[in-house]
Amino acid sequence: MYDLIVIGGGPAGMTAALYALRNGKSVLVLEKHGFGGQITYSPKVENYPGTKEMSGNEFADKLLEQILALGAEVELEKAVSVEDADGHKLVKTEEGNAFESMTVVIATGVKHRMLGLEGENELVGNGISFCAVCDGDFFSGQTVCVAGGGNSALQEAILLAEKCKKVIILQDLPELTGEATLQNILRSRANVEIETNRKIVGVQANGDGLTGVTVQDRVTGAEKTIPCEGLFIAIGLIPENGPFADLADLNSYGYFASGEDCLTRTPGVYVAGDCRSKSIRQLTTACADGAVAALAACRYVNERK
């Protein structure tokens, strides 16, 4: 039986493993796809303290190497349930295996809602992005489009307008849905264009990356191509926390309703990273959650050994 099982191999999950291992605990990390999570889509990370520049893949590889060197065990399996019984946890996977531990950190992250276009996934990190704070500098002096019209999209557009030659907001509804204050800020910017009733139906690219997006007028059906170097998609995030709702409360958006302590209503079960309800989702906050959750799990284990 392990001291800790971490569900999710992104920055939060691997940091949780790191801190538990440094405290002499046995750790298993279950990851369903590939280690690193959303950060692997970032070609350059320039806002991580102490590191001038690195790729998201480089960060993920180094963190994985670090926890493996400390003795972490890893399995590429999808956790589908956690049972709480007799003072321990039983984590079952889609592959039919079951693993026992004293504690569990759930760090399942989120996935960005995509547009569902042909060739879209291949352009993530090569013209398509999701975070103006992370990637906005790469498009300084260029033209970018922002897909979406809610608060998140408008906040992204405001940040991009400070750096980019032109920012074009593409909303598929008749009007923007974000706060009036944000709308007013954007409408006052000379380099911002707002187009409503515009559905993005295609992306264009060459060997260097994105070159434009094709939009359809939802009223007339007419299509046009907008040349641009970047497309920031801000149409929502999708948490995948449903399988663990019997252990930890979810808010109305499906995120774990847990505070900065990363605790849940189930003793010995903790949550960390973007899957948790929070106002800021960045690499640094994910790692911070992982440390907090792991140290709480270590205290739980120490009290029972």
Image: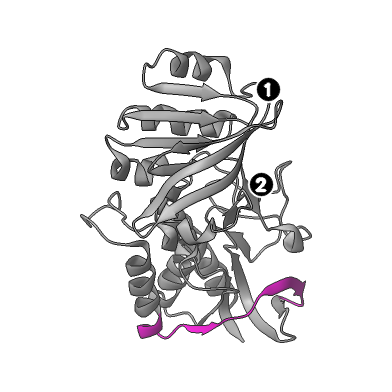
Q: Give the percent coordinates (x, y) of residue 142.
A: 31, 36
Residue drawn 47% across and 67% down?
A: 16
Which segment is the magenta one? 68-87
Residue 16, placed above or below residue 229: below
Answer above or below: position of 57 versus 124. below
Q: Amino acid at mark 2?
A: Ala
Asked whether residue 25 is drawn in magenta, I would say no
- Which residue position holds label 2? 257
Q: Position of residue 26 (x, y in %)?
A: 50, 83
Q: Which quadrant does the C terminus fall into?
A: bottom right
Q: Crowdedness of circle 2 by 10 Å Cα count: few (<14), some, many (20+)?
A: many
Residue position for label 1: 174
Q: Is residue 166 left or right of residue 7?
A: left
Q: Residue at x 66, y 75 (%)?
A: 78
Q: Is residue 125 visible?
A: yes
The secondary structure type at the circle numbered 1 is: loop
